[in-house]
Image (tube, rainbow, N blue to C red):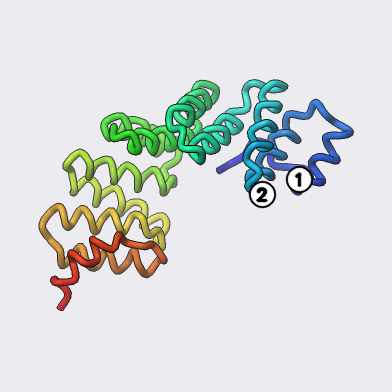
Amino acid sequence: MKKTFDYGPKTVAALKAALQDNPDSAALLYNLGVSLVAERNFDEAEKAFHEALALEPDIAEAYVQLGGLAMHRGDLEKCLAMNKKATEIRPRFAVPWGNIGFVHMQQQNPDKAVKALKKAISFDPQFIQAHTTLGSAYLALGDPDGCIMQCAKAVEIEPMFGPAYNNMGLAYLEKGDPHTAIRYFDKATETGFEVEPQIMAEIAQYRS
């Protein structure tokens, strides 16, 4: 994720030391939160992001981070709310739109996901995850060709992005073309992506 506040000390200890001298720095608090997330200290990270927002309420990235922490806890509604808040602050910020689309997919709302993901891609055409999740949404809506087209764009950007190949394999299965599907599932596996075992078992009979 691109960060507005991306300067100064990086380690938790260095950031806490810097905050002793400058306790009202929203930038330092935000960076502390990011560093705490990296250390998987999620409770302290959440506190740091809230403190940063108390000082500077318009840090869209902090809301995205809070959304990520909510997702980690399995709180999809909170994740959705935090990312929506980020888009209110920065309407052209692609990351929260992508996250909103992902949450809608988790909530079985592919129609809503498509709208959010199209916005994400319009603001960042190189947003690989958004292309791939949009492919998943098209597949969920019964449009395997749309899925293939969208995921092909993802692998043009990043040829080793396994989830996109996996989606294309699923789409070709949906189209009744298991032989082509095998090629894409194999490509997904080559990238290190783990294709669902039941899918691999289902297509085994079509291998020559």
Q: Residue at x 41, y 66 (%)?
A: 192
Q: Residue at x 39, y 35 (%)?
A: 103
- Dot 2 crowding, Cα within 10 Å, few <14, some 14–19, many 20+: few
Q: Residue at x 18, y 48 (%)?
A: 145
Quadrant in the picture for residue 60: top right
The C terminus - image quarter: bottom left
Q: Residue 174 at x, y = what percent?
A: 15, 52
Q: Callout 2, which amino acid?
A: Glu
**Disc 1 and disc 2 in contact, CB within 8 angstroms:** yes
In the image: residue 47, left or right of residue 65: right
Q: Residue 16 at x, y = what percent?
A: 81, 39
Find disc 1 in the rendering and name its residue.
Answer: 12
202 in relation to 15, above or below = below
Secondary-structure class at tag 1: helix
| Residue 156: numbered disc | none
Residue sitting at the far right: 21
Secondary-structure class at tag 2: loop
Residue sitting at the far left: 176
Q: Residue 53 at x, y = what percent?
A: 66, 24
Q: Callout 1, which amino acid?
A: Val
Quadrant in the picture for residue 183: bottom left
Q: Residue 150 at x, y = what percent?
A: 29, 47
Is 119 in front, or is 47? 47
Q: Residue at x 20, y 53 (%)?
A: 171
In the image: residue 56, left or right of residue 80: right
Find disc 2 in the rendering and name its residue.
Answer: 39
147 in relation to 186, above or below = above
- Dot 1 crowding, Cα within 10 Å, few <14, some 14–19, many 20+: some
